[in-house]
Amino acid sequence: MSEPNTITLNGKAHPVEGVQSISDLLQSLGLEEKPVVVELNHEAVFPRDYQSTEVCVGAQVEIVALAAGG
């Protein structure tokens, strides 16, 4: 069970004070300008929807930063 005012972020509890959208979450993590893939409650979220997709207390979020290389 999650703690009050937290989400599960990449498998760990993470506070969500002031976070309302995926965009807010990415900004709070310093990832707003980085190429990332976001999954919210086991469903992929398109970058165009980050601003309008709400992050609720108790949500499960996975964020994977993309890196070039080979």
Image: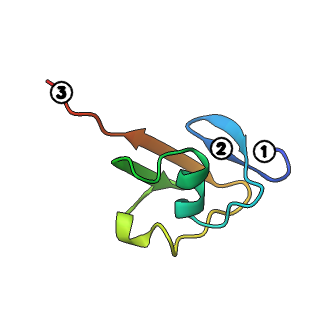
Task: Please tell me which of labels 3 and 2 falls first in the chain.
Answer: 2
Q: Measure how far apart labels 3 and 1 are at the Cα level.
A: 36 Å
Q: Is residue 29 left or right of residue 57?
A: left
For residue 56, which quarter of the picture?
Answer: bottom right
Q: Residues within 10 Å of mark 3 (few under 14, many from 20)?
A: few
- On-image quarter of the C terminus: top left
Residue 56 vertical position relative to residue 49 in the rendered view, above or below: above
Query: Quick one: label 1, few (<14), some, or many (20+) residues within 10 Å?
Result: some
Residue kind at label 2, given as amino acid type: Thr
Q: Which mark is residue 69?
A: 3
Q: How many marks?
A: 3
Hey, what amino acid is under mark 3? Gly
State the residue position of label 1: 2
Q: Callout 2: helix, strand or loop? A: strand
Q: CA distance from mark 3 to mark 2?
A: 29 Å
- The reply to whether callout 1 and callout 2 are in contact (CB within 8 Å) is yes
Q: Which class describes the residues within 10 Å of circle 2: few (<14), some (14-19), or many (20+)?
A: many
Across and down, in percent, residue 51 comes to: 50, 71
**Is label 1 in a helix, a strand or a loop?**
loop
Query: In the picture provided, is 34 more to the left or to the right than 26?
Result: left
Pointer 2: what residue? 8
Looking at the rendered image, the disc whose residue lies closer to the viewer, 3 or 2, is 3
- Viewer-side label of 3, 1: 3
Q: Is residue 50 above or below residue 12?
A: below
Residue 2 point in image, percent of width and height: 78, 44
* Residue 11 locus on image (x, y percent): 60, 35
The amino acid on which the numbered mark 1 sits, given as a three-letter code, is Ser
The image's mark for residue 21 is none
Q: Residue at image x 59%, y 66%? A: 21
